[in-house]
Image: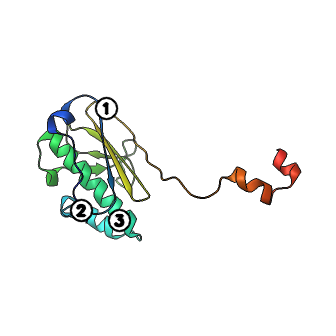
């Protein structure tokens, strides 16, 4: 099992800016205990172990970062997901349910998890793995006629 990823100090997390943590999606000892019962059930519903691990690590990292920034216990950080437009709890960007807490964004791909937090307002992070598949342009000569390739 991977160790818990290092995070910035509480002082650093309270300063302006975006703070990023990149981790593998492997579970680390104790990560799952930072999730709620509902989040653990959601994680268990993932068909692929890699996706499950990425979800667990992402939620645990968010709680550790917000806990460091706010001084609240990590297990008590509520992460709510509700649509700010319609109020549904079935979709919408997850956010910390504590007034004044930093905002966060999580992205995961190919066994990696990227978490960003900021006291300055909304943010979005994205991580994508690079595919070994050939580009469509490289495939064109083998599947398109000369006329089709010119278009």
Task: Using the numbered discs, state the Cα–Cα distance from disc 3 to disc 2 in whole angstroms.
Answer: 13 Å
- Asked which colour scheme the image uses, the reply is rainbow
Residue 69 image position (x, y, % from top left) = 17, 39
Question: Is residue 104 visible from the viewing direction of this image?
Answer: yes
Name the residue that disc number 2 marks: 28
Q: At 32% across and 65% down in the image, what residue appears?
A: 43
Q: Identify the element where label 2 is drawn.
A: loop
Question: In the image, residue 83 lies at what x, y percent?
Answer: 37, 46
For label 2, count other residues whose C-alpha is less than 10 Å away and answer few (under 14), some (14-19) or many (20+): some
What whole-number distance in Å separates the C-alpha atoms at marks 1 and 3? 28 Å
Q: Name the foreground residue: 117 vs 86.
A: 117
- Residue at figure coordinates x 24%, y 38% from the top left: 102
In the depicted structure, whether residue 70 falls above or below residue 27 = above
Counting other residues with Cα less than 10 Å from the Cα at mark 3, is it few (<14), some (14-19), or many (20 or more)? many
Along the polypeptide, which appears first: circle 1 or circle 2? Answer: 2
On residue 52, the disc is 3
Image position of 9 (left or right of 119):
left
The CA distance from mark 1 to mark 2 is 29 Å
- Give the quarter of the figure containing the C terminus: top right
Q: In the structure shown, which secondary structural element does the residue marked by tag 3 occupy? A: helix
Which of disc 2 and disc 3 is earlier in sequence? 2
Residue 84: x %, y % from top left = 36, 42
Q: Which mark is residue 121?
A: 1
Residue 74's tag is none
Residue 36 position, x and y percent, is 21, 61
User: Is the N terminus in the top left, top right, bottom left or bottom right quadrant?
Assistant: bottom left
Q: Residue at x 64, y 56 (%)?
A: 134
């Amino acid at each position: 099992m991977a160790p818990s990823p290092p995070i910035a100090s509480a002082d650093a997390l309270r300063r302006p800016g975006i703070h990023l943590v990149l981790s593998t999606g492997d579970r680390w000892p104790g990560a799952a205990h930072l999730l709620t019962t509902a989040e653990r059930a959601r994680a268990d519903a993932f068909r692929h172990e890699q996706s499950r691990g990425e979800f667990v690590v992402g939620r645990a990292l968010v709680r550790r970062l917000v806990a460091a920034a706010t001084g609240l216990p990590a297990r008590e950080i509520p992460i709510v997901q509700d649509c700010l437009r319609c109020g549904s709890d079935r979709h919408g960007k997850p956010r910390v349910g504590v007034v004044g807490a930093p905002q966060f964004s999580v992205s995961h791909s190919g066994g990696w998890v990227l978490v960003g937090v900021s006291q300055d307002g909304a943010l979005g992070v994205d991580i994508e793995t690079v595919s070994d598949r050939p580009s469509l342009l490289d495939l064109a000569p083998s599947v398109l006629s000369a006329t089709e390739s010119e278009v």
